[in-house]
Amino acid sequence: MATTKSATEFDSRKPLHDSSRPRIGIVTAIATLGGALFGYDTGVISGALPFMTLGRQEGGLGLTPAQEGFVTASLVFGAAFGAIFGGRLSDRQGRKRNIMLLATIFFLGALGTALAPTTGVMIAARFLLGLAVGGASATIPVYLAEIAPANRRGQIVTVNELMIVSGQLLAYTTNAAMAALFPHDSIWRWMLVVATLPAVALFLGVQFLPESPRWLVSKKRTEDARAALAQVRLSHEIEPELTEITAVVHKDVASPTPGLRDLRIPWVRKLILLGVAIAFLSQTTGVNSIMYFAPSILINTGLGTQASLVATIANGVVSVLATLLGIAMLRRGIGRRPMIITGQTGVTVALLLVGVFFLLPESTARSYLILGGMLLFLLFMQACIGPVFWMLLSEIFPLRLRGYANGLSTSFVWVANTLITFGFPQLIESIHGNTFFVFALINIGTLIIYVMGVPETRGKTLEEIQEQLRARYTTSRA
């Protein structure tokens, strides 16, 4: 359709200043503050809980063991709902506005946990935080994938994973530092309130971010999409990419609002089932058993309490370093399939080693061997699986229902997380180190599924991926 250009509209004959490309780094840094909040809020509870179990006269909430479980799991439970509704809202109101909303919820949730006068209020505030965590996990990778150049998408989306594990490391070190420097009974409130600061920074920073150009085209706001691309692309890249996005959107223009009815479409149904499988199986690796319960595991092996707490920081350090390694591998052009298959093989071997080490006679050496096995697990998990599964979820779904389908799939991250969080303590109490053989068996099955079903998306635009997967799953038997 022909249109008349106004003086303020983009003119492809006028070159943009080539410094527009580095803006993608600023966009990534601001958007992934949501990942840092995700990490901090999931990690900080480990240091706050011991103080919250103190009696009210001592500055705590007097939590019972059962209440500790509810306080910990309420965030994970809320995240499952946050992922579903966050994904749908990002399709309806845009990625940028949804991130602004999530920043507000992060702030209110963190403030609510810090000021909570009762256990009930604490659980409610943690559930609210969970809505933000789930919404962030469904929205931010999609936003980054949609705004990144195809040849840098892997590196940029993976930065969110780096910020998640960095947020967890920050939580662990902040907890230890505050407990050592300010040893009073109400210090847990200060641990929790720290999360309001990045929430404010995210809310203010997102005001300056461009909206996803792909979402704008889907809403027939082509000129706004052109302007958004102009902030993160070189001038000669804008029109070809805009043309490709528009062509794919036009194929979906007659489709209804995304929802469960899309499961009737065979190729869409297969994609959503693939996304759900990738999301769910990423957590049945047992990663959160190690991240949440590492100190308890090590104390049960006979390692001292102080050494076990230091080991928790080691988990965070290895996770950050491993994620940096994953980013470096993506920068070198290693594909998604070989990375996730290598990672899955590595975590399976590491789990088998931890199980074998538990069979050794109790000793300090055995404790450190188990710790080494856990760190080896985290190396493969955070370098290969963590970055890639979030990236695949942001890439494989068609634009029209990307937010909805990604949110639905991501909710299963939190469903699996909840099951593991509740089930692991019972397993470790009943069958001890054999728990890791159970996880290893599950991960062998996961490896087979990845080999058979994970597509390669490296180096392709989101539109090329959509057409490739549409063809793949349309021609295969429903």
Image (spheres, rainbow, N blue to C red):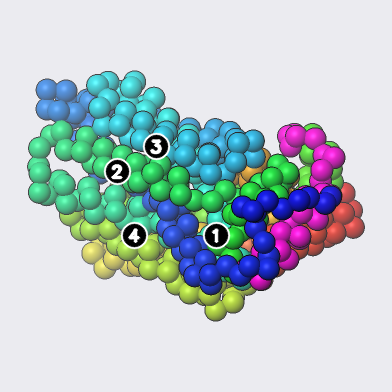
Q: Position of residue 38 (x, y in %)?
A: 42, 46
Q: Secondary structure at mark 4?
A: helix
| First in sequence: mark 1 vs mark 2 | 2
The residue pinned by badge 3 equals 106
Q: CA distance from mark 4 to mark 3?
A: 25 Å
| First in sequence: mark 4 vs mark 2 | 2
1 or 2: mark nearer the eye: 1
Three-letter amino acid code of the residue under disc 2: Leu
Q: CA distance from mark 1 to mark 3?
A: 27 Å
Quadrant of residue 427 in the image? top left
Q: Are marks 1 and 3 in contact (CB under 8 Å)?
A: no
Q: Position of residue 424 (x, y in %)?
A: 44, 44
In the image, is 370 to the left or to the right of 190? right
Q: Position of residue 326 (x, y in %)?
A: 49, 69
Q: CA distance from mark 1 to mark 4?
A: 38 Å
Three-letter amino acid code of the residue under disc 1: Gln
Q: Are marks 1 and 2 in contact (CB under 8 Å)?
A: no
Q: Secondary structure at mark 1?
A: loop
Foreground residue among 237 and 420? 237
Q: Position of residue 36 (x, y in %)?
A: 39, 51
Q: In the drawing, what numbered circle is on residue 315?
A: 4
| First in sequence: mark 3 vs mark 2 | 3
Q: In the drawing, what numbered circle is on residue 231?
A: 1
